Amino acid sequence: MILSADFSLMQDQPYNLISSESAKIIANAIENRSGWQEFSSFGIGLGAILAGGAGLKIILDWWEQKQIVRRINNLNRKYPESRFNKNYKFVATKKVRGKWYLLDFKTKKRHWIRNYETVRDMGWEGKLKSVSETTLARYTPGITISTRKFYF
């Protein structure tokens, strides 16, 4: 029997399109399909976990960028550009290279600037002055200033 285009049975055909041996192979494949379904389900589950991990990474990166902007805004409020050299200045000593400080004249504290990314984020590049160790020693240690989060 053969199905026609309108899915009605055509009984006038003298031959079968599928041999009985092919029918057995197809029947076995249909019976064993549950193994394929389990593998397929595992693959879909693994794909969902990996996609979820990538989504989590995107969300965490977005959150970190939001925190950087928040830290920059807080520092800009505390140390506005208009008060540079009046309330604070950026210094380094000749003795220790690569270590920058913000000297706060109001609180008489020196704040260590953790990294160059903070200097760049705040627009403080080119404003660094060199001071002696004795000038730096007159200020008490304050907090560490950083716009970036460190995980170590």
Image (cartoon, rainbow, N blue to C red):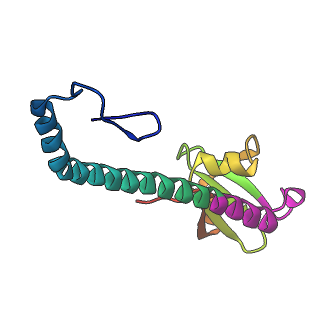
Q: Nearer the viewer, residue 127 or 152?
A: 152
Taking the spot 44% from the left edge, 60% from the top edge, the residue there is 151
| Rendered position, 11 above or below 141 | above
Spot occupied by residue 139 in the image (x, y as percentages of width and height) = 65, 68
Spot occupied by residue 25 in the image (x, y as percentages of width and height) = 12, 36
Report the magenta residues as a range: 66-88
Residue 84 visible in rendering: yes
Spot occupied by residue 67 in the image (x, y as percentages of width and height) = 64, 63
Taking the spot 21% from the left edge, 24% from the top edge, the residue there is 15
Q: Nearer the viewer, residue 132 or 14?
A: 14
* Quadrant of image for the C terminus: bottom left
| Rendered position, 46 above or below 63 | above
| Left/right of residue 16 with respect to residue 129 in the rendered view | left
- Is 81 contained in the magenta span? yes
Q: Quadrant of residue 20?
A: top left
Residue 135 visible in rendering: no
Looking at the image, the residue that sits furthest to the right is: 82
- Is 142 contained in the magenta span? no
Q: Nearer the viewer, residue 57 or 100?
A: 57
| Left/right of residue 132 with respect to residue 37 in the rendered view | right
| Rendered position, 145 above or below 108 | above
Taking the spot 61% from the left edge, 56% from the top edge, the residue there is 62
* Quadrant of image for the N terminus: top left
Q: Nearer the viewer, residue 12 or 126?
A: 12
Taking the spot 85% from the left edge, 56% from the top edge, the residue there is 81
| Rendered position, 23 above or below 43 | above
Looking at the image, the residue that sits furthest to the front is: 12
Spot occupied by residue 55 in the image (x, y as percentages of width and height) = 50, 55
Which secondary structure class fits the magenta region best? helix
> How many numbered circles does the render carry?
0
